[in-house]
Image: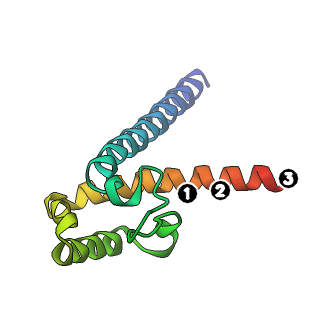
Amino acid sequence: MLRRLIGTAVSLILLVLGLSAFTLKEEDSSARGKDLFRDYCAMCHRLDATGMCMAPSLIGVTNRMSTKEIAAHSRKIAEEMMCARPIKKLSDRDFEEIVEYLKTLDSRRNEENSSTIR
Protein backbone atom coordinates (compact mmCIF):
# COMPACT_ATOMS: atom_id res chain seq x y z
CA MET A 1 0.00 0.00 0.00
CA LEU A 2 2.78 2.42 0.94
CA ARG A 3 4.67 1.52 -2.24
CA ARG A 4 1.61 2.25 -4.37
CA LEU A 5 1.08 5.58 -2.58
CA ILE A 6 4.71 6.58 -3.11
CA GLY A 7 4.53 5.49 -6.75
CA THR A 8 1.40 7.58 -7.30
CA ALA A 9 2.98 10.60 -5.61
CA VAL A 10 6.11 10.31 -7.74
CA SER A 11 4.00 9.99 -10.88
CA LEU A 12 2.04 13.11 -10.00
CA ILE A 13 5.21 15.07 -9.32
CA LEU A 14 6.70 14.01 -12.64
CA LEU A 15 3.47 14.92 -14.43
CA VAL A 16 3.42 18.38 -12.86
CA LEU A 17 7.10 18.95 -13.67
CA GLY A 18 6.53 17.78 -17.24
CA LEU A 19 3.59 20.14 -17.73
CA SER A 20 5.58 23.02 -16.25
CA ALA A 21 8.46 22.34 -18.62
CA PHE A 22 6.03 22.22 -21.57
CA THR A 23 4.47 25.55 -20.55
CA LEU A 24 7.90 27.15 -20.13
CA LYS A 25 8.93 25.86 -23.55
CA GLU A 26 5.82 27.40 -25.14
CA GLU A 27 6.45 30.70 -23.34
CA ASP A 28 10.10 30.73 -24.44
CA SER A 29 9.06 29.96 -28.00
CA SER A 30 6.50 32.76 -27.97
CA ALA A 31 9.02 35.24 -26.51
CA ARG A 32 11.59 34.36 -29.16
CA GLY A 33 8.84 34.53 -31.78
CA LYS A 34 8.00 38.05 -30.64
CA ASP A 35 11.65 39.04 -31.02
CA LEU A 36 11.81 37.51 -34.50
CA PHE A 37 8.51 39.12 -35.48
CA ARG A 38 9.77 42.50 -34.25
CA ASP A 39 13.02 42.12 -36.21
CA TYR A 40 11.63 40.70 -39.46
CA CYS A 41 7.91 41.46 -39.72
CA ALA A 42 6.81 44.36 -37.52
CA MET A 43 8.26 47.06 -39.76
CA CYS A 44 5.40 46.35 -42.18
CA HIS A 45 2.81 44.44 -40.13
CA ARG A 46 3.33 46.40 -36.85
CA LEU A 47 4.27 44.70 -33.59
CA ASP A 48 0.60 44.08 -32.75
CA ALA A 49 0.20 42.46 -36.22
CA THR A 50 -2.67 44.76 -37.20
CA GLY A 51 -0.94 45.70 -40.45
CA MET A 52 -0.46 49.00 -42.23
CA CYS A 53 -0.17 50.33 -45.76
CA MET A 54 0.28 47.38 -48.11
CA ALA A 55 0.99 44.85 -45.34
CA PRO A 56 -2.23 43.16 -44.20
CA SER A 57 -3.24 42.43 -40.64
CA LEU A 58 -2.02 39.05 -39.45
CA ILE A 59 -4.63 38.81 -36.70
CA GLY A 60 -6.32 35.42 -37.05
CA VAL A 61 -3.91 34.15 -39.73
CA THR A 62 -3.05 31.16 -37.52
CA ASN A 63 -6.70 30.12 -37.72
CA ARG A 64 -6.65 30.16 -41.52
CA MET A 65 -3.18 28.86 -42.38
CA SER A 66 -0.79 26.26 -41.01
CA THR A 67 2.72 27.16 -39.94
CA LYS A 68 4.08 25.64 -43.16
CA GLU A 69 1.64 27.67 -45.25
CA ILE A 70 2.57 30.87 -43.43
CA ALA A 71 6.28 30.15 -43.96
CA ALA A 72 5.78 29.31 -47.65
CA HIS A 73 3.70 32.43 -48.28
CA SER A 74 6.21 34.62 -46.43
CA ARG A 75 9.10 33.19 -48.42
CA LYS A 76 7.20 33.84 -51.65
CA ILE A 77 6.67 37.47 -50.60
CA ALA A 78 10.39 37.68 -49.80
CA GLU A 79 11.15 36.71 -53.40
CA GLU A 80 8.79 39.33 -54.80
CA MET A 81 9.29 42.32 -52.50
CA MET A 82 12.66 43.89 -51.82
CA CYS A 83 11.65 45.09 -48.35
CA ALA A 84 10.83 41.50 -47.31
CA ARG A 85 14.13 39.96 -48.47
CA PRO A 86 15.48 39.48 -44.91
CA ILE A 87 12.72 36.90 -44.36
CA LYS A 88 14.79 34.50 -46.46
CA LYS A 89 17.14 34.13 -43.47
CA LEU A 90 14.41 32.64 -41.27
CA SER A 91 14.45 28.89 -40.62
CA ASP A 92 11.41 26.65 -40.28
CA ARG A 93 11.92 26.77 -36.49
CA ASP A 94 11.96 30.59 -36.63
CA PHE A 95 8.60 30.55 -38.39
CA GLU A 96 7.21 28.12 -35.81
CA GLU A 97 8.18 30.56 -33.06
CA ILE A 98 6.72 33.54 -34.94
CA VAL A 99 3.46 31.62 -35.30
CA GLU A 100 3.49 30.90 -31.55
CA TYR A 101 3.75 34.65 -30.98
CA LEU A 102 0.89 35.32 -33.41
CA LYS A 103 -1.22 32.75 -31.56
CA THR A 104 -0.68 34.67 -28.31
CA LEU A 105 -1.93 37.83 -30.03
CA ASP A 106 -4.99 35.94 -31.28
CA SER A 107 -5.77 34.50 -27.85
CA ARG A 108 -5.39 37.92 -26.20
CA ARG A 109 -7.67 39.46 -28.80
CA ASN A 110 -10.25 36.69 -28.28
CA GLU A 111 -10.13 37.26 -24.51
CA GLU A 112 -10.60 41.00 -24.99
CA ASN A 113 -13.53 40.46 -27.35
CA SER A 114 -15.24 37.99 -25.04
CA SER A 115 -14.88 40.32 -22.05
CA THR A 116 -16.35 43.28 -23.93
CA ILE A 117 -19.33 41.22 -25.13
CA ARG A 118 -20.35 40.31 -21.57
Looking at the rendered structure, the kind of residue marked 3 is Arg
**The N terminus, quarter of image:** top right
Q: In what element is the residue under mark 3?
A: loop
Picture residue at 36% right of the left edge, 67% below the top: 67
Looking at the rendered structure, the kind of residue marked 2 is Asn
Instruction: Say the numbered circle drawn on residue 110.
Output: 2
Instruction: Say the numbered circle drawn on residue 118.
Output: 3
Picture coordinates of residue 107 (x, y %)? Answer: 58, 53
Kindly report the distance in space between the C-alpha atoms of the residues bearing marks 2 and 1: 6 Å
Q: In what element is the residue under mark 2?
A: helix
Instruction: Say the numbered circle drawn on residue 71.
Output: none
Picture coordinates of residue 44 (x, y %)? Answer: 34, 60
Q: In what element is the residue under mark 1?
A: helix
Structural crowding at the residue carrying mark 3, measured as other residues with C-alpha within 10 Å and reported as few (<14), some (14–19) or many (≥20):
few
- Residue 3 vs 80, above or below: the answer is above
Picture coordinates of residue 4 (x, y %)? Answer: 57, 29
Picture residue at 28% right of the left edge, 48% below the top: 36
Query: Do the residues bearing badges 2 and 1 touch, measured as CB atoms within 8 Å?
Result: yes
Structural crowding at the residue carrying mark 2, measured as other residues with C-alpha within 10 Å and reported as few (<14), some (14–19) or many (≥20):
few
Q: Mark 1 points at which residue?
A: 106
Looking at the rendered structure, the kind of residue marked 1 is Asp
Picture residue at 39% right of the left edge, 60% below the top: 45
44 or 6: nearer the viewer: 44
Structural crowding at the residue carrying mark 1, measured as other residues with C-alpha within 10 Å and reported as few (<14), some (14–19) or many (≥20):
many
Picture residue at 25% right of the left edge, 56% below the top: 93
- Residue 105 vs 32, above or below: the answer is below
In this rendering, position of residue 68 left or right of residue 116 = left
11 or 65: nearer the viewer: 65
Kindly report the distance in space between the C-alpha atoms of the residues bearing marks 3 and 1: 19 Å
